[in-house]
Amino acid sequence: MPMAAGGVRRDLTRVLRGLRSAEAIQRYLDEEVKYNDGPTTFRSPRRVARDRVAHCLEGALFAAAALEQLDHAPLILDLAAVRDDDHVIAVFRENGHWGAIGKSNYAGLRYRTPVYRTLRELVMSYFEHYYNPRGEKTLRAYSRPILLTRFDHLDWRNTEQDLWDVASYLVDLPHFSVLPAPIERKRFRMDRRLYEAGRFGAVG
């Protein structure tokens, strides 16, 4: 099938063409794409657009492809947790400030307006909203941003194969701690109201 600009096949480009801002990309992931809580998959953006289902990594890949069409670099970043799953977001810069797009079963782990001066500021904005089913705040570290063009040989935008290599690469990356060592092992508990608010609309 013919390729459009940026290596995206035209059937995916038709979906991305209507997403003209970071907010529109997040709205598409929220309203048009079901959260993937089934068997483990690592769908490409083309498969996400077709199947309308994604977990955080799949959503981040889709968002990165969509941001690429808006002349942003296709970047994703891994957030690492204790006693919890990692979370992957697509990150972008506007006017020298960082923002993010995310797909999550938790309301507070999604969009961030590009107002953060550094990646650490952006990451720390997720701390109060990143928690496990027991109500523990679990965010502990983050990776550097990954430029997805390093996976162009896998045809990451369009492939029908699961992108296991991308997932494995994120796991093996060095991560930067978000907490000082003396308190890193402390268990921080959620307020019940914030816990319930974050689970609004959750699947499962």
Image (spheres, grey):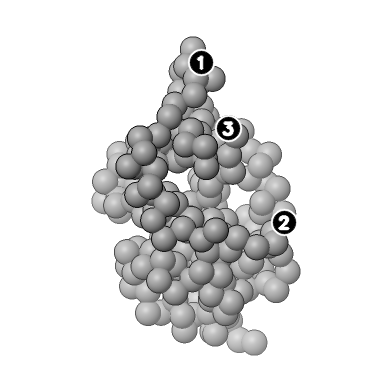
Decide which of 174, 184 is in the foreground and name it: 184
- Point 33% across, 73% down: residue: 20
**Looking at the image, is mark 2 or mark 1 nearer the viewer?**
1
Q: Which of marks 1 and 3 is nearer the N terminus?
A: 3
Residue 148 vertical placement versus 65 (above, below): above
Q: Where is residue 140 in the image (x, y as percent from the top left)?
A: 51, 30
Q: Position of residue 126 (x, y in %)?
A: 40, 41
The residue wearing badge 1 is 181
Q: What element carries label 3?
A: loop
**Residue count near mark 3 (Cα–Cα under 10 Å), binned few <14, some 14–19, many ≥20:** some
Name the quadrant containing residue 25.
bottom left
Residue at the bottom extreme? 1
Give the amino acid type for the residue marked by disc 3 in the picture. Answer: Val
- Point 52% across, 37% down: residue: 134
Decide which of 180, 82 is in the foreground and name it: 82
The residue wearing badge 3 is 82
Q: Where is residue 10 in the image (x, y as percent from the top left)?
A: 54, 84
Residue 111's label in the rendered image is none
Marks 2 and 3 close (CB-CB < 8 Å):
no
Q: Where is residue 204 in the image (x, y as percent from the top left)?
A: 55, 58
**Residue count near mark 1 (Cα–Cα under 10 Å), binned few <14, some 14–19, many ≥20:** few
The residue wearing badge 2 is 164
Q: How far apart are marks 1 and 3 (CA)?
A: 14 Å
